[in-house]
Image (spheres, grey):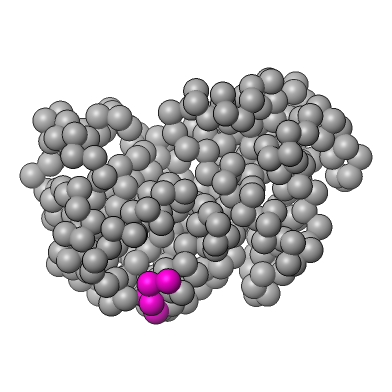
Amino acid sequence: MCDFSKKVAVLGGGSWATALAKILLVKHPTINWYMRRQDQIDDFIRLSKNPSYLTATKFDTSRINFTNNINDVVRDSDILVLAVPSPFLKSHLKKLRRKINRKIVFSAIKGMVPDENMIVSDYLHYYYGVPMENIGVIAGPCHAEEVAFERLSYLTIGCVDREQARDMSQRFATPYVKTAVSDDVDGLEYSSVMKNIYAIAAGICHGLKYGDNFIAVLISNASQEMNRFSNAIMPLHRNINESAYLGDLIVTAYSKFSRNRLFGNMIGKGYSVKTAQMEMEMIAEGYYGTKCIHELNQKYQVNIPIVDAVYNILYERSSPTLEIRRLTEQLA
């Protein structure tokens, strides 16, 4: 039976963190919430909503213990839900003066730790000593904006300890969020990273005026790439057609809420990487994930031509027109 007296904390101030907090408050009487900026916290309390993200979603702030001190939130919480952009995870965790090795830590970050090129679960285990059975991942096709509208959504909760996964799945299960459990932590994380890269590819193709027919072929091939790479990293009997893998790929590649698709669309229309990043209000995780997966694949040498094409466009300044044209000859 799930113990709802355990203190749960959300770490992050963006749209996904806000959506997760909304879900958790359905069943939990209170939550702890870490945001980096005190002015954002002050405005949140004054307005009863996040001033920057999902601004139509109202909160009962008397049920939220806000703090801009990461050590306070770690001290006062049993379960930590990480929802900060992957490029900033290290800078947040470097502020820690308290150990997290006895905490339950679940990552909702759909990206990798740059430089180390590690998925978040591995980073927490190797650098912070959190046992793998206390590390989990929150995955699945679930846009924050649709959670805000309470549209039916699905989450997959992954942990090598399935009891731990079941416990967390109960915490996130609501009338509008259905949950499933998995022990494929690595597969869920790598798929979550790679689907953002493929969404950028889909956006680039859309910006170049390729139609739905080609983009459907692109995403079909992307699913196969994702499966090949996941199996090379962690061989496991997984069904890539399940919603946590294929479903998340499809929604990220096609949805109007997808920041990675939007970023790619801008690149396809001729924006430079820097200009596209400046015009977007949110982080496109796939930009960072592309470099991580490309560099990691120097070791594994998996055939992932779509990732290679996106890397060449974003980091080698290759022409999107030429890269996608070459890609059309490789896909089937």
In-image side of 23 versus 122 (left or right): left
Q: Nearer the viewer, residue 309 or 93?
A: 93
Image quadrant holding the C terminus, namely: top right
Q: Residue at x 28, y 53 (%)?
A: 10
- Return the x and y of residue 17 as percentages of the image width and height: 33, 46
Report the number of numbered marks.
Answer: 0
Do we see residue 10 in this rendering?
A: yes
Q: Residue at x 73, y 39 (%)?
A: 316
Magenta span: helix, strand or loop, mainly? loop
Picture quarter containing residue 124? bottom left
Q: Is residue 210 inside the magenta stretch?
A: no
Q: Residue at x 84, y 30 (%)?
A: 322
Picture quarter containing residue 42? top left
Q: Quick one: which residue is furthest to the right in this view?
A: 329
Do we see residue 28 in this rendering?
A: no
Q: Nearer the viewer, residue 139 or 276?
A: 276
In-image side of 136 versus 322 (left or right): left
- Return the x and y of residue 164 as percentages of the image width and height: 36, 74
Q: Residue at x 41, y 37 (%)?
A: 146
Q: Identify the magenta region.
A: 127-131
- Return the x and y of residue 189 as percentages of the image width and height: 54, 60
Position above or below: 303 against 299: above
- Return the x and y of residue 156 as percentages of the image width and height: 46, 59
